[in-house]
Amino acid sequence: MTWESVIGLEVHVQLATRSKIFSGASSAFGAEPNSQACPVDLGLPGVLPVLNEEAVRMAVKFGLAIGAEVNAYSVFDRKNYFYPDLPKGYQISQFEQPIVGRGELIVHTEDGPPKTIGITRAHLEEDAGKSVHDAYAGLTGIDLNRTGTPLLEVVSDPDLRTAAEAAAYFRQLHTLVRYLKICDGNLAQGSMRCDANVSIRRMGESELGVRSEIKNINSFRFVEMAINYEIERQIELLESGGTVERDTRLYDAERNETRSMRSKELSNDYRYFPDPDLLPVEIDDAFIDAVAASMPELPEAKLNRYVTELDLSDYDAGWLTQDPDAAGYFEAVHAVSGNPKLSANWVMGELSAALNRAELDIAQSPLSAEKPGRLLQRIEDGTVSGKIAKGIFETLWQQGGEVDAIIAAEGLEQVTDTGAIQSLIDEIIAANPDQVAQFQAGKDKVFGFFVGQVMKASKGKANPQQVNELLRDALKH
Amino acid sequence: MHADSSLIELANGLKNRTFSSLELTNAYLSAIDESQDELNAFITVTADIARAQAKAADERLAAGDAPALCGVPLAYKDIFCTEGVATTCGSRMLENFIAPYTATAIARLNDAGAVMLGKTNLDEFAMGSSNENSYFGSVANPWDPSRVPGGSSGGSACAVAAGLAPAALGTDTGGSIRQPAAFCGVSGLKPTYGRVSRYGMVAFASSLDQGGVFARGAADIAMVLGHMAGFDPRDSTSADQTDDWLTACRSQPPSAASQGRIGIPKQYFVDLGVTDASMQNACRTLEAAGFTLVDVSVPHVDAAIACYYIIAGAEASTNLSRYDGVRFGHRCEDPQSLDDLYRRSRSEGFGAEVKRRILTGTYALSVGYYDAYYLKAQKIRRLIQQDFLDAFADVDLIIAPTTPDVAFKRGDLVDDPVAMYQQDIYTIPASLAGLPAMSIPCGQHQGLPLGMQLIGPHFAERTLLETAAAFQQLTDFHQLRPEPTA
């Protein structure tokens, strides 16, 4: 029997505002526990929330980026439940009238054409604090620094059909929010967290199966592994005559399995209702226009431009545009070098390898893009060969300096003077009569030996193309 | 020196250096001290702070150009947060809560040099109409200590009536300023929703709560309101608009209106009972003063009480969720589990009326009941608001009784919550509509005060205060004082 899986993701995007969504406290990560919680975050009696306009601006930016309707009127609601890290006993969220309505996102997977995934809605809400269960024996610590951090919850349609597709969607969202500069995208610090709703049904059926929800997954790889595990679990259940219970599950990465947290029957009645402390959010056209004017080139547009205008391969364009920092670096290299393909190769090759060895992100690169750009320009104008350029890159990486200065100081300029190359060739031919005889007897492979000897004699600086041409001429005689 | 003077007279005395703020403050502090056993109007008396503020005020007064309110002692309902001083809300839950901030309204009065005498008693979390729901004991009506002062701002109304403060702050959610003002024979104004910042005012029902003022007369109220009202960026629901007239009230009493159209809503004037005579007299007085009386109709007010108890309860049920014993407030001994911590901390920390409202509010918001209760109540609320807007197309303000009767006996209604809720029948509609409304003394029945309500369009505090000033020029009900106690 063949099964089809149906997957929808809810992704919590932590917005990169300086202060919290309803208070002036800092939202920076990693401070001393409870040092960034003001009376509003603590839910002390008498204090009131005031909406951070920057969070609204970021939500609108996201809405425009996914081609969604930005609702002119949206409402904050209270979601009521008791938990020690939820100081007010309710979370301020948006329930019936979210700020961002229906939109879509194009997702690229390795196999198959790009797929458009519907986005049901995106709404603003505040994050809760953190319960720390392992720091004190027998006690739970509460850190309220995260309380009130602005979140944009992005809810997809159940359009995803495989775990790989779901992971690709999550990754695409990650790319998008980083382009928009509305989230730092730091998954390890929880800046993007994902809940996956997974169900299966027989291929061809139109009705949805009973779903389970896997909570709080925070890596692309885990999204894929957790969903795959869950699909398998549900198939096994149904094929062995069981039924899938609607429940909420946690993914345990160490064991690669999902475990039930609570069943939906025991779930809370959240008693949503409009928060009377906050006015409805009204957004006018001028606000939207101002946000629209600040939009960067979006990843999909950039990818298309790289392919059609810069003639890059789909793979290269995809690789470079996935990370806005990589795309920015590439564009800066290209601006100096003038050769898109060469620039792409070097960013994806030499630079990427060096960064990996140093465990650095491209944004942390010790080399400004201008330097590889200049280096590639020197390949383009024939000043140095590609091979020599690799050595110069190493020097730049290890010791710094300027490309042209290194070339001059180390005498690395490519030899293109025909007379100089010819005299090297003459010397090599004279010194290797046996090989000359072999070549002339028809052993073509020996040609490579001569090229190598000439290049070596030139310390790698001779123009390889000229060496080839002159050598062939010389050996004919 | 103080018992028979209005706030404005005292402010003038301070300005003219007839007496010092410290002398005045000390006089009030000893009056409070003498009254406490019988009246119990205060939960906390802040004598040291009051004297320090009085000395500072005297220096400002000596230096000249001090605000008109400088050095005037005031009492604050114990639901306004005051940095460094306990803010109990009349609840065991917050018996030891000391806020690290001061409510905006009080911060503004502090800036003007007002002196804080103390924090007045109230029904727990402002829920009640008799001040019998206070963890710190009930408050007596100074006109007859066997009777209630009204609620929830009973301590503030009692303090002004008994001469323990020339003016006091209260909060009004469904009548909590106007009803005790009527019962205690003083004037009380609930401003337009949004006029006074709610920041630092502990929430009961956020869409209804509004801070206001008790004093003898309209002029006194205008001076205090002028100092404390105005937009506050820390309260998203505070109104971002200036009112030059109100600002001028800081130093200049409102003039008395001499004309205007006053609506008589027929729904309020059915079976007036003991209030009938005083209401009729008040109408005649206003007519004689030049006002025109016009019949108006507010047809949906009969649903106001039910609507109010659903909305206020719903909001209260979640506003009070933060009292969970985790971070502040009452915490039960030796909790066995998280649920046990919540259950016992809240069971022990809250009184019966607060629990009742949390339960009814929770019910009204629950799945399956939300549409039938909460949403329907919101629709009725809009109808009531529209009723008033329609009426104000024809009249400048509306007159109505404040309460169905004089102050009732302590203990009479404690076991009958529905009868208790009926006490708010005349005050709730204006609250639901967010309108400014004030109660001013308009007569007596068997030696006990009665009040009448003036209800105006949004932000028409000027109309209310100038009309009240006109009425108070022609009558002396607001000057009547109870016999000194003890």
Image (cartoon, coloured by chain):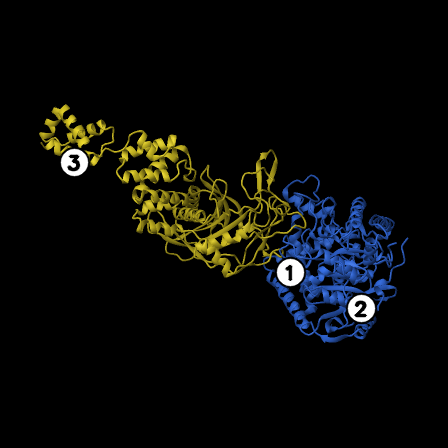
Chain colours: A yellow, B blue
Q: Which of the chains bears the disc numbered 2?
A: B
Disc 1 on helix, strand or loop?
loop
| Residue annotated with mark 1 | B241
Whether labels 2 and 3 share one chain: no
Name the amino acid type tagged 2.
Answer: Phe
User: In front of the other: label 1 or label 2?
Assistant: 1
Image-based side of B106 in relation to A109, left or right:
right
Q: Which of the chains bears the disc numbered 3?
A: A
- Relative image position of residue B334 (x, y in whole percent): 69, 39
Q: Which of the chains bears the disc numbered 1?
A: B
The front one of A250 and B120 is B120
- Answer yes or no: is residue A286 visible: yes
The front one of A233 and A409 is A409
Quarter assignment of residue A206: bottom left
| Residue annotated with mark 2 | B471
Q: Which residue is drawn at 32% across and 45% down?
A: A315
* Of the image marks 1 and 2, the number of the one nearer the N terminus: 1
The front one of B15 and B338 is B15
Disc 3 on helix, strand or loop?
helix
Name the amino acid type tagged 3.
Answer: Glu
Residues at discs 1 and 2 in contact (Cβ within 8 Å): no
- Relative image position of residue B444 (x, y in whole percent): 85, 66
How far apart in space, not on screen, are marks 3 and 1 (Cα)?
86 Å
Residue A333, compared with residue B176, is above or below; it is above
Residues at discs 2 and 3 in contact (Cβ within 8 Å): no
| Residue annotated with mark 3 | A469
